[in-house]
Image (tube, coloured by chain):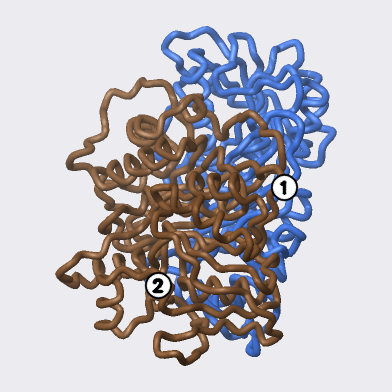
Chain colours: A brown, B blue
């Protein structure tokens, strides 16, 4: 993304204008969009420099790189929009590697006809999320696709960070005996999207939990650098994420149904719709696996942070060659926590 | 992008199968696609580790980060496809910053119904380009959008590299007197796409110039570290790119029409279609601005590399407060090289 000098006679009509194909075509119109919207809103010295990339100070320590494409529909939903989600999603992937995120890049695929006012709102949300997180968007790109070949806007973000000293978190490090923690109630993002899309008028509207978790993770790792696994339960929810970890580590897990935090509105909506909260995506929660003796310390650190107040221990890792994730139900029985073929909803994040 | 352990009973039907929404939904089907296609083809220790990001050795020197979304249509064209283009495009942006690219990330937005055989071909082309360049795809992500909300496949890639010592290339560093070089004939990518899309049956098919230029740039900067500006003339072609640089640096330029390398097939097709080769995208050429006295040395270094054999000096930077890019025509006149509102073609890269 390049910011050119300000020599344009016309200005973008941000109130009534729409994206058209020239906005992605490498000429004056694209420069105008980049400069008057993206750089104006996301501006920082790296973007302002106006080159096809950014030159950045190199951190001490190992680099971490993570990327995510964001295609959520609708673009705006209770609790957020695709702009802040595109920042949070990638920051959380970097944080889940045990790293401190430092820089973000953003690639936009805009659909012809998108209202510039919507794009402005999305980029402003992105800027707020990026500033709140202290991680600038240092470089970007914009393409425009013809009407009917996109979804309004898709945003692919990539994060670069630096691994914390002495930290080694990895999906294959779960060990029998580890305790399984979650940093807050589950299923809110998935249900917020579903309700927004289907215009379900629930008595209590469900709000996405989308949030940047690197601060919470920093506090956790400061208190307990021995954490074994961190992963954010996005698409596929808790059930997919725990099954993934069980398979990567070659272990089983036993969850306590009664211990898993689920807000009443989410539980009620899931009941109504025949969905399992365990399958519903979160965008502001982290799963933490750590040695049992350090779990109380980890919980204290999580609960001391505003984004971890409702952190809970929800189960433990067990030895199991079949790599089953099981649940001790409220009724005293045990059931398998299945790993669905896919999330029940497309374009969830 | 996460590679899970190999515990799936079914295997992907790469011959007759198609992408469906479960392939992007965070469950077993997505893991199957990631593992049996992406990791299988792009595999390297970082991807194989199966986490949501990659941990990477930190280079000495300043980091460079660049990103590009790729939405080219058709997905396959003479001389390449969206897979190799997505590698080349971002490597060239990193190279144009004067940096050595080290790592790539890739975010895929797949459209429901895409043939898995096509996806495999695209990812294989990406893997070949990445291996030929010596720059691995270390992390990735896959989303699937419903039919009619995509373009088969879109690929956003981000590159991280390290700035070369003693190099300072930047769009604002053009100085009156600098010579303007181009590393090869122009307009081939844009015309190859146009001809492929419109099924124009030219006597001589035009082949895209898509190529990774970081090796060529490395040789150039080894010989002439004093280069002022590097930029690849992609969307909008030579005319947009030179106008951008003129505006960033506050200078004018005078080009020599007779010196600009254009292959006869490109010149003929442009003549026929009423297009100007200067407006047509390149994906394997670099514009180089350097002090006049170093231009012969720069040209020698470029021409010694297989991708720079046809490098030419095409003009010079002049003092001009109006920042005009002008062309000395073959007929002895002068004309302004306009900067179009946009590239004449959507989805060119």
Q: Position of residue A85 (x, y in %)?
A: 40, 53
Q: Name the residue under label 2.
A: A280
Question: Relative to residue A46, is residue B328 depicted above or below?
Answer: above
Give the image quarter of residue B225. top right
Residue nearest the observer in this picture, B234 or A105: A105
Residue A134 can be seen, yes or no: yes
- Determine the secondary structure under disc 2: loop
Quadrant location of the N terminus of chain B? bottom right
Query: In this rendering, would B118 be left or right of A203?
Result: right
Q: Where is residue A245 in the image (x, y as percent from the top left)?
A: 62, 71
Question: What is the chain letter for disc 1?
Answer: B
Question: What is the chain letter for disc 2?
Answer: A
Q: Name the residue under label 1.
A: B56
- Determine the secondary structure under disc 1: strand
Give the image quarter of residue B52. bottom right
Q: Position of residue B195 (x, y in %)?
A: 53, 57
Question: At 71% from the left edge and 39% from the top edge, which residue is drawn?
Answer: A61
């Amino acid at each position: 993304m390049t910011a050119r000098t300000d020599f344009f006679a016309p200005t973008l009509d941000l109130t009534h204008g729409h994206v058209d194909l020239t906005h992605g075509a490498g000429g004056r119109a694209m420069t105008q969009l980049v400069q008057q919207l993206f750089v104006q809103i996301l501006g920082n010295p790296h973007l302002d420099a106006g080159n096809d990339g950014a030159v950045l100070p190199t951190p001490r320590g190992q680099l971490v790189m993570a990327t995510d494409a964001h295609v959520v529909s609708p673009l705006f939903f209770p609790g957020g929009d695709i702009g802040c989600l595109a920042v949070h999603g990638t920051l959380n992937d970097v944080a889940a590697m045990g790293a401190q995120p430092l820089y973000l890049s953003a690639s936009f695929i805009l659909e012809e006809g998108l209202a510039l006012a919507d794009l402005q709102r999305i980029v402003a949300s992105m800027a707020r999320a990026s500033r709140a997180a202290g991680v600038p968007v240092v470089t970007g790109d914009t393409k425009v696709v013809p009407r009917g070949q996109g979804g309004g806007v898709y945003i692919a973000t990539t994060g670069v960070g630096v691994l914390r000293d002495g930290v080694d978190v990895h999906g294959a490090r779960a060990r029998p005996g580890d305790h399984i923690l979650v940093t807050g109630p589950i299923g809110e993002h998935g249900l917020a999207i579903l309700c927004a899309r289907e215009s379900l008028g629930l008595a209590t509207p469900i709000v996405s939990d989308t949030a940047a978790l690197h601060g919470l993770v920093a506090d956790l790792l400061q208190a307990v650098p021995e954490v074994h696994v961190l992963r954010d339960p996005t698409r596929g929810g808790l059930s997919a994420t725990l099954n993934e970890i069980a398979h990567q580590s070659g272990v089983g897990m036993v969850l306590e149904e009664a211990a898993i935090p689920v807000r009443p509105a989410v539980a009620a909506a899931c009941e109504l719709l025949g969905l399992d909260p365990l399958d519903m995506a979160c965008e502001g929660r982290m799963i933490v696996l750590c040695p049992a003796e350090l779990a109380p310390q980890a919980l204290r650190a999580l609960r001391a942070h505003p984004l971890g107040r409702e952190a809970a221990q929800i189960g433990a890792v067990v030895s199991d060659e079949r790599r089953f994730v099981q649940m001790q139900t409220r009724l005293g029985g045990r059931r398998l926590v299945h790993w669905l073929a896919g999330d029940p909803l497309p374009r969830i994040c």
